[in-house]
Image: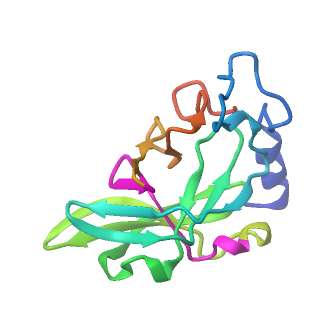
Amino acid sequence: MTADDLKRARALWSFRGSRRPDWAIEPGPGQESVWDYPRPPRIDHSKRVVRVKYGETTVAETRGAVRVLETASPPTFYIPPEDVRTELLVRAPGTSICEWKGSATYWSLELDGSKAPNVAWSYETPFPEFDEIRGYLSFYPNKLVCYVDDHRVSGQLGGFYGGWVTPEIVGPFKGQAGTGSW
């Protein structure tokens, strides 16, 4: 991606966290609106227990996750590699480009002869602004069972984005048809 391509991609977004659209859900006490998150995204450190499971196997567990907060998306939790059972992961084919974070690497899970494809992603060489998440892994809650503290996470709709929907997060969220430029 050239510098001009990157600049064009970053300019496409209609909302940047400076104001909530009229149709956004008003957050109640203790809630966060994804429409208050900034663009470019912000990194937020979390001390909550973040756990990822495949069946009865714990794939990752940490109190050292970081959340990436971006306008219109539920937070994405990134887990330090030392808190992930990386021996269960194999690199999956393909990549994608995030105009804010860089080129994503995808990971599949292999356990006891079964394979769960494309369950996680990471940024091995992120853009400098996101170097803090270099090598950290995020998991799709639509493909594995994910928890934040004792709350089971719901996945962001649409199949591409990997936001973690927890009870304190209100939207609506991008991901469904027609929301690509939110």
Q: Quadrant of the N terminus?
A: bottom right
Where does the image place residue 27, in percent across and percent down from the top left? 67, 29
Where does the image place residue 11, in percent across and percent down from the top left? 83, 41
Q: Compared to 164, does 59 lie above or below? A: below
**Which residue is at a point 75% across and 16% down the rendered structure image?**
22
Q: Residue furthest front?
A: 29
Residue nearer the viewer, 70 or 49: 49
Q: Compared to 44, does 122 lie above or below? A: below
Q: Does residue 63 show up? A: yes
**Which residue is at a point 78% across and 31% down the rendered structure image?**
14
Q: Residue furthest top?
A: 22
Q: Residue furthest left?
A: 113
Q: Does residue 100 show up? A: no
Apparent side of residue 36 relative to residue 170 in the rendered image (left or right):
right
Q: Compared to 97, does 122 lie above or below? A: below
Asked if residue 93 is among those painted magenta in the image, a careful observer would answer: no
Residue nearer the viewer, 19 or 46: 46
Apparent side of residue 25 relative to residue 163 in the rendered image (left or right):
right
Q: Quadrant of residue 23?
A: top right
Q: Compared to 88, does 167 lie above or below? A: above
Where does the image place residue 138, in percent across and percent down from the top left? 50, 62
Q: Quadrant of the C terminus?
A: top right
Asked if residue 133 is among those painted magenta in the image, a careful observer would answer: yes
Where are the magenta residues, as a range? 131-149
